[in-house]
């Protein structure tokens, strides 16, 4: 597998390698800020004293899987559940990020270790162009879906929404922190721009942009053709 491998960092100074490196970095940021997230929303039950209630939730945002205990004014303890399953958009977004990270890693190895093979092959840049364009579309779809899913998660965990079923005795508390998830959406759309922009630099390596049959040396005394 390492036959012919020659490490050359020169491609990182060119747009093709540098933008791919940015793809690799921001792809990690996108799925890392989504996967593993945990948060909690709060409200209180006002009886003789205020009893705080914390409803925890996290990735992949199957909210009914996170029950929480509430003590009513009569002393009864009941179990309530957050409502809504938003795992499909979150998991799709993370899946695109993970596979994008793997593809970036593979192509960076190809660019830096097998640059001559990549540029001498007509198939390599073409396959790279098609896959990169496909990932750009996936970033558009997954980021849009996750942006909508995140909006729904915010609504489902809003303390003002949670106390609607007990407005007489419940008071909304602190909101969950969504800064990390907001950043994940931004990284998702930034990846869309980077991957779509990288298509141009990869296109320049294909035979569609290059002359596949460069003219040979002219004979002595010959003149260039029209």
Image (spheres, grey):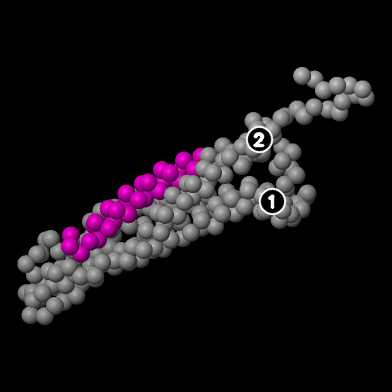
The span shown in magenta is 134-161
The image position of residue 135, as x and y in percent, is: 50, 43
Farthest-out residue, top: 226
The image position of residue 176, as x and y in percent, is: 29, 66
The image position of residue 24, as x and y in percent, is: 56, 54
Q: Which residue is mark 1?
A: 11
Q: CA distance from mark 2 to mark 1?
A: 16 Å
Note whether 153 is above or below 226 in the view shown: below
Q: Closest to the observer: 178 or 56?
A: 178
Is 148 in the magenta? Answer: yes
Q: Which mark is residue 119?
A: none
Which quarter of the figure has residue 182?
bottom left
Q: Which residue is mark 2?
A: 206
Q: Residues within 10 Å of mark 1 (few under 14, many from 20)?
A: some
Q: Closest to the observer: 115 or 18?
A: 18
Which quarter of the figure has residue 39?
bottom left
């Amino acid at each position: 597998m390492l036959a012919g491998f020659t490490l050359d960092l020169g491609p990182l100074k060119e747009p093709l390698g540098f933008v791919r490196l940015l793809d690799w970095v921001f792809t990690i940021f996108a799925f890392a800020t989504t996967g593993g997230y945990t948060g909690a929303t709060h409200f209180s039950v006002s009886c003789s004293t205020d009893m705080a209630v914390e409803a925890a939730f996290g990735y992949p945002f199957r909210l009914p899987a996170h029950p929480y205990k509430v003590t009513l004014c009569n002393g009864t303890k009941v179990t309530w559940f957050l409502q809504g399953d938003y795992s499909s958009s979150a998991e799709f977004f993370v899946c695109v990020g993970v596979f994008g990270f793997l593809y970036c890693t593979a192509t960076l190895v190809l660019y830096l270790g097998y640059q001559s093979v990549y540029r001498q092959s007509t198939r390599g840049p073409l396959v790279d162009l098609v896959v990169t364009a496909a990932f750009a579309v996936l970033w558009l779809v997954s980021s849009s879906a996750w942006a909508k899913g995140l909006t729904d998660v915010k609504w489902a965990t809003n303390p003002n929404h949670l106390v609607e079923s007990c407005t007489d005795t419940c008071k909304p508390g602190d909101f969950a922190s969504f800064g990390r998830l907001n950043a994940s959406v931004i990284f998702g759309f930034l990846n869309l721009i980077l991957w779509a922009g990288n298509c141009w630099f990869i296109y320049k390596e294909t035979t569609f942009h290059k002359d596949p049959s460069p003219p040979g040396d002219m004979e002595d005394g010959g003149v260039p053709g029209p």
